[in-house]
Image (cartoon, grey):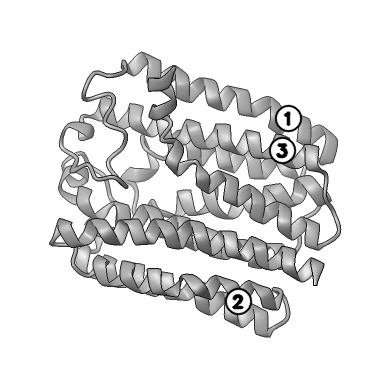
Amino acid sequence: MKKLLLETRPQFLILSVILAFLGTAIAWYDGSFNFGYALLAATGLLLAHISVNTLNDYFDYKSGVDFNTKRTPFSGGSGFLPSGILSSTQVFWLGTGSLLLAIPIGVFFIIDKGWQLLPLLIVAVICVVLYTPLILKTYWPEWAPGLGLGILPVLGMYFIQTGEYNLPVFIASVPSGILVHNLLLINEFPDVEADRKYGRKTTPITIGLSKASLFYSVMTIAVYVWVIIFVIAAIMPVYCLLAILTLPFAIKAIRGSMRYDDLNLLVPALGSNVLVVLITQLLLGIGYILAGVL
């Protein structure tokens, strides 16, 4: 059980908890909150995230890319399959079982809150199941995690509380999409040679590491510009400007991404980027809570 738990990469599952918090915080700010629904929906999101992590490991192992990856604390998978700690069958059923457990939760909310949740869940499942075996072999695959594990969870958590979508919550979800997109983007830097060998078309492969570093930098800065613009426009609460506090980590990540040729400098950048992804979204959620309280 301990090995199966570690295979889920629990340190990265924090992202799902924060996404659930952000979407629920926005709904609470708008006057809707049900703790039981929030907990159940967060559980479903966590199960889906576990499925993403483990099925990615499974498909990476089956393709052979796992044996050529430069594993770091932030990229390259768990390493449990190449080392023989777990079998591919165990990991496959862990991922599949987690997804199957998440589906009844989604069905419950579709019945209770409305069919409008169904398209969101279908797209999310497609992103989970097809990302490694198919989407990674198309140009600019990073859109899928940005959508499936960024924008859609925030929208879904909001819908489960309110029974509707609206423009302000979509605007609030866009930073999550960019941040998760960038999480995958920069984590692909160490794996360019291995990914290219196995037919993947990640952005660092298709446009080169230098341009990918520039793309990552622009997208990272875009998160802060986006928040500032929509705070000025009074669509996001002024307390969301707390998200700017992560800018020093973002600058460190950007500088490190430009040294993609030196793994000793790139790995700390990956760590800084993780902090940007998690803390920025956490601060956005806190911003909505503060705006509702003060």
**Residue 255: quarter of image:** bottom left
Which residue corresponds to mark 2?
A: 241
Q: Residue 253 placed where, x, y %? A: 32, 67
Which residue corresponds to mark 1?
A: 107
Left or right of residue 173, residue 264 in this image? left
Mark positioned earlier in the residue sequence (2 or 1):
1
Callout 1–callout 3 Cβ contact below 8 Å = no
| Real-space Cα separation, disc 1 to disc 3, in angstroms | 16 Å
Which residue corresponds to mark 3?
A: 39
Mark positioned earlier in the residue sequence (3 or 2):
3
Q: Please tell me whether residue 284 is drawn above or below residue 147 in the rendered image.
A: below
Residue visible at 44% across and 43% down in the picture: 12
Q: Residue 101 placed where, x, y %? A: 61, 23
Estimate how packed mark 3 is, as few (under 14), some (14 to 19) or many (20 or more) residues with alpha carbons within 10 Å.
some
Q: Residue 175 placed where, x, y %? A: 54, 65
Q: Please tell me whether residue 261 is drawn above or below residue 194 in the rendered image.
A: below
Residue 215 in view, yes or no: no
Question: Camera-side residue: 201 or 70?
Answer: 70
Residue 166 in view, yes or no: yes
Callout 3–callout 2 Cβ contact below 8 Å = no
Left or right of residue 150, residue 71 in this image? left
Residue visible at 72% across and 52% down in the picture: 24
Left or right of residue 72, residue 15 in this image? right
Q: Which residue lies furthest to the bottom in this view?
A: 232
User: Which mark is in front, 1 or 3?
Assistant: 3
Callout 2–callout 1 Cβ contact below 8 Å = no
Give the quarter of the figure containing the N terminus: top left
Q: What residue type is labelled 3?
A: Leu
Q: Residue 16 placed where, x, y %? A: 56, 44
Which type of secondary structure does the marked residue at label 3 adopt?
helix
Q: Which amino acid does label 1 sit on?
A: Val
